[in-house]
């Protein structure tokens, strides 16, 4: 694929690697893209706007409160509100190089210049290529901000290791322009095959209260469900995410429902699943909850042991599949995907769960995947096809799960 017909906003920040954005501009133009450059005020300390104006063939924007550029420029030339005007036709927002400063501003919603304000109003995918000194890159603040931005759905081209401009060795060198171009092409070729489809996803753990200060839960991080939600959104789906408590930022552009207990989860899923085309139940819902809830904090007392009696929670998966009419006889909406977390006999147990709960697909994964960014899984469908997925990122696994669910939905399986 080339970038013909694509409109790219290229944000350039005040780092020593700003000069490399010139080569990237040339490559993007050569590939057919219409490139509009926005420079931070500090970026202009490193390289002149004239370079980008010449290479892109478009005016370079930098100030929030400037006058519009002279004709014959077209897009974005209204000028009175460049932070909005510029984003209207944008297919992707690229930030190359991204400074620690801009990453911090994006991650925290600070909008004190044109580029950071424009970031908040852009609806298109965002690709960020950081470049900085290795100590800066490794600092907890920068790493936390990157994590936060990834949670919002931003894409990253990670910096490379090597000799840095300051003379240090380490991770922080801007990824090569070729690599960035490849990632741009990849992001812009994302299929919009979920357009018009509603995807319901559950994620995270549930918390079953014992008393006002204690609960039973599990270590589910929610990463898998959130990765599916982000991927479904990227592919054009209308996404509803019902989530137990996690530390992950809510992806932008989706409908988010926050729950705590299995009972909350059940109530919301039963409300939502009928309106979905695909329901992906990735939450780790507690199988049990305390039989009795104490509305006062249970005192430690003198006894060495206490007994907590548990009751079984309703099985949400079985409940939704059994309420779908004619489920056995034909392919009907919604497609229901379940997850099985196993410590042993993964395939055997997953097949049993698929059958008993009348699912379309089951994703079986090992307990080791808890909290990790990676997962090794087995996907089994109704026809007992078993697909062994090697250890891959949860983002990649999310795409595969959506591919398989869509294939069933469109009746190809
Ligand atoms: C010579 C020099 C090189 C710099 N290189 C970088 C860099 O590579 N990455 C970075 O994050 N900051 C770098 N800085 C610091 C930024 O310029 C500074 O944080 C600035 O506020 C960034 O502004 P901006 O994000 O609005 O462009 C550098 C500063 C100087 C003086």
Image: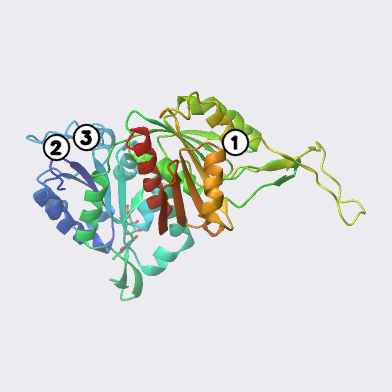
Q: Quadrant of ligand 1?
A: bottom left
Q: How many marks?
A: 3
Name the N-terminal-most of marks 2 and 1.
2
Quadrant for residue 86, please give it.
top left
Tell me, for residue 283, which label it has, or none.
none
Point out the image quarter for the C terminus.
Answer: top left
Q: Residue at x 33, y 33 (%)?
A: 410
Residue neighbourhood size for the residue with mark 2, other residues' Cα within 10 Å, grouped as few (<14), some (14–19), many (≥20) = some
Rendering coords of residue 40 (x, y %): 27, 50
Mark 3 secondary-structure assignment: loop
Nearer mark to the viewer, of 2 and 1: 1
Query: Quick check: 271 left or right of 124?
Result: right
**Name of the residue lying farthest toward the left:** 72
Name the N-terminal-most of marks 3 and 2.
2
Q: Which residue is mark 3?
A: 89
Residue 92 position (above or below residue 48): above
Q: Please report contact status of discs 3 and 2: CB closer than 8 Å, yes or no.
A: no
Q: Which residue is mark 2?
A: 69
Asked whether 267 or 50 is in front, the reply is 267
Tell me, for residue 259, which label it has, or none.
1
Rendering coords of residue 136 (x, y %): 40, 65
Q: Residue at x 24, y 44 (%)?
A: 188
Quick check: can you spot residue 120? no
Q: Please report contact status of discs 2 and 1: CB closer than 8 Å, yes or no.
A: no
Q: Whole-Å distance between the Cαs marked 1 and 3?
A: 37 Å
Mark 2 secondary-structure assignment: loop
Quadrant for residue 14, please give it.
bottom left
Rendering coords of residue 353 (x, y %): 56, 44
Residue 11 position (above or below residue 195): below
Asked whether 141 or 210 is in front, the reply is 210
């Amino acid at each position: 694929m080339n970038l013909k017909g694509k409109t790219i906003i290229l944000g350039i920040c005040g780092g020593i690697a700003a000069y490399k954005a010139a080569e990237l501009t040339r490559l993007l133009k050569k590939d057919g893209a219409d490139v509009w450059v926005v420079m931070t005020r500090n970026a202009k300390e490193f390289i002149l706007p004239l370079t980008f104006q010449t290479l892109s063939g478009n005016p370079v924007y930098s100030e929030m409160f400037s006058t519009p550029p002279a004709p014959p420029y077209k897009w974005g030339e209204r000028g009175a509100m460049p932070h909005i005007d510029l984003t209207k036709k944008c297919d992707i927002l690229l930030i190359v190089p991204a400074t620690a400063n801009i990453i911090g501003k994006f991650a925290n919603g600070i909008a004190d210049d044109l580029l950071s304000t424009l970031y908040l109003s852009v609806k298109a995918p965002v690709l960020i290529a950081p470049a900085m000194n290795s100590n800066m890159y490794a600092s907890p603040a920068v790493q936390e901000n990157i994590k936060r931005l990834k949670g919002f759905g931003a894409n990253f081209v990670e910096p490379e290791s090597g000799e840095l401009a300051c003379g240090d060795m380490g991770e922080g060198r801007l990824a090569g322009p070729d690599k960035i171009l490849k990632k741009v092409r990849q992001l812009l070729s994302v299929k919009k095959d979920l357009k018009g489809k509603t995807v319901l996803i559950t994620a995270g753990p549930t918390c079953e209260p014992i008393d006002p200060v204690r609960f039973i839960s599990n270590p589910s991080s929610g990463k898998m469900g959130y990765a599916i939600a982000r991927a479904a959104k990227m592919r054009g789906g209308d996404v509803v995410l019902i989530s137990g408590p996690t530390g992950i930022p809510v992806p932008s552009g989706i409908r988010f429902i926050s729950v705590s207990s299995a009972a909350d989860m059940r109530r919301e899923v039963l409300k939502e699943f009928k309106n979905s085309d695909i329901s992906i139940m990735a939450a780790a819902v507690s199988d049990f909850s305390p039989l009795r809830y104490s509305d006062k904090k249970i005192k430690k007392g003198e006894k060495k042991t206490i007994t907590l009696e548990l009751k079984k929670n309703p099985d949400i998966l079985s409940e939704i599949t059994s309420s779908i009419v004619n489920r056995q006889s034909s392919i009907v909406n919604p497609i229901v995907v379940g997850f099985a977390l196993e410590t042993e006999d993964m395939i055997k147990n997953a097949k049993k769960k698929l059958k008993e709960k009348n699912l379309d697909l089951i994703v079986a994964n090992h307990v080791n995947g808890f909290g990790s960014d990676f997962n090794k899984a087995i996907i089994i469908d109704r026809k007992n096809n078993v697909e062994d997925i090697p250890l891959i990122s949860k983002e990649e696994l999310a795409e595969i799960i959506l591919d398989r669910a869509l294939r069933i939905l469109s009746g190809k399986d």
